[in-house]
Image (cartoon, rainbow, N blue to C red):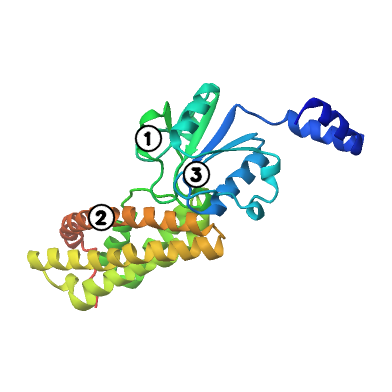
Amino acid sequence: MNQELLTYLEHFITEERKERFLQVISARTNHFTVAMEDVFQMHNTSAVVRTCEVFGVQQAHSIEGRFGKRLDAKIAMGAQKWVDVFRYNDTQSCIDALRAQGYQIVATTPHKDAYFLNDFDISKKSAFFFGTEKEGLSQQVLSQADTYLKIPIPTIAGDKTALHVGNAFCVLAALLIGGTYGGIAGSLGMTIADLMDPAYISSAPKTFILKFCIGFIAGTVAHKFGHISKTDKKSDLIFWSTMASIAGLGFNVIMDPIVGYLYKRYLLKVDVSAAKIMATYAAGTTLINAIVSTVLIVILYAALRPVLIKSGLFLKIK
């Protein structure tokens, strides 16, 4: 729009509205921009443009080589009228255009040595690249990026994907004091830990239910089927502590992603695509946790049992 036409059109709005326009424009920035590479779900691209408008980011860049145009005016809710949206048929054109404007290319990815958001240097002019929902950014972007940024998943839903052995102690408690009491002890302990951490607080109800089930199932297998507290045969102790761990943690490997998806999608109202991605990450991490925890449980139970027997604290569960 040329300046002469703009000056003419200004006569059709009030001074108050003109002042409001100038106020909003003064708060806009081109220091940061966002580039979306072949995002599949149209509503995700549109939501990004809407978010740019809310946070005052003036430009957004959409690479549409694989899936075509990815902007839905209904979801963008008019934001596309106020944000400059640039479209590209291929990734390289977008990278070249942004470099020509002085931007550093920032690839968002969890798969490389990357800065966390809190450690990222915001003083440099930066273009943040986001990839497809399932595959992430292409190798073309990753290989040309100036730096990398990782964003923990999924803090927006009160949960994080992390390696830990907390579930091991739910099972261990069940082996030592029975499924019901062990399940309650483990679930209460881990739920209290969730409540004390803002990043996990909204997942506390899910934690209580799943951790109790882990302990109850493990205890049932160990004591109802294996009678583990009534035998001193080393091979039986190893076998049934392993079976109990597999049963309890196997339940969690299956149910944690499912319950997590339903909890985030329908109670926390997380977008369906984001909820699916979170569930996928959770499934892989939960499986690794289960394998590591099973080994730890067998070792700890074998070490603690004789100490408790010697001290007179060992319980024989019916």
| Tag in front: 2 or 1 | 1
- Amino acid type for the residue under numbered disc 1: Gln
Q: Position of residue 260 (x, y in %)?
A: 44, 61
**Residues tagged 3 and 2 counted as in contact (Cβ below 8 A):** no
Circle 3 residue: 64
Residue 293 image label: 2
Side of 121 relative to 247 (left or right)? right
Q: Which residue occupies the foreground of this view, 128 or 64?
A: 64
Sequence-wise, which precedes: disc 3 or disc 2?
3
Sequence-wise, which precedes: disc 3 or disc 1?
3
Quarter residue 61 falls in: top right
Q: For residue 314, say whether it is visible.
A: no
- Amino acid type for the residue under numbered disc 3: Glu
Q: Mark 2, residues whose alpha carbon is within 10 Å: few (<14), some, or many (≥20)?
A: many
Circle 1 residue: 140
In the depicted structure, whether residue 250 falls above or below residue 142: below
Q: Residue at x 49, y 29 (%)?
A: 120
